[in-house]
Amino acid sequence: MTLSQLAEQIGMTPTGLGLVIKSGKTMTDKLEKIAQVLKVRVGVFFDDDEEDAAPSTAIPSDMQAVLSQKDKIIAQKDAIIEQKDAIISTLITKH
């Protein structure tokens, strides 16, 4: 499952989901949707002791791969924002 696929399944954009991952902040309803799609308990997203976590709460390896892509996705988003800002600055300067 890719980040885009997960975002689609929970009703978010990939960019929005990337921001949630980067900030670590979201509404509980979004966390519940993510947990449901990933088939894990919501507590997985918090500082649960690994010893207390049931084996079913482990994030599947394919999802680990998706989560590991977050830095790349965030960097792409940041580059797009920088390009947008440069274009706006250029347009403002010419007028």
Image (cartoon, helix red, strand yellow):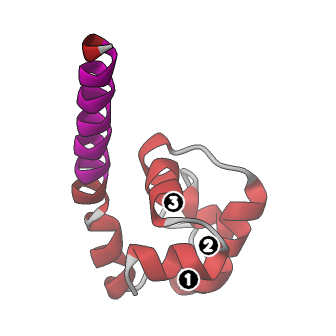
The CA span between labels 2 and 1 is 6 Å
Q: Nearer the viewer, residue 3 or 51?
A: 3
Residue 17: mark in rendering? 3
Crowding around mark 3 (Cα neighbors within 10 Å: few <14, some 14 to 19, many 20+) is: many
Q: Residue at x 27, y 65 (%)?
A: 68
The image quadrant that residue 86 belongs to is top left
CB under 8 Å between discs 1 and 3? no
Main SS category, magenta section: helix
Q: Secondary structure at mark 1?
A: helix
Indicate the amino acid at tag 2. Answer: Ile
User: Is mark 2 in CB contact (under 8 Å) with mark 1?
Assistant: yes
Residue for badge 2: 34
Tell me how many marks there are: 3
Q: Disc 2 to disc 3, how far (Cα)?
A: 10 Å
**Placement of the C terminus among the 4 image quadrants:** top left
- Which of pointers 2 and 3 lies earlier in the amino acid sequence? 3
Furthest-right residue in this view: 29
**Label for residue 38?**
1
Please report the bounds of the magenta region as a residue range: 74-92
- Residue at image location 34% in from the left, 16% down from the top: 92
* Percent coordinates x, y for residue 83 in the rendering: 23, 38
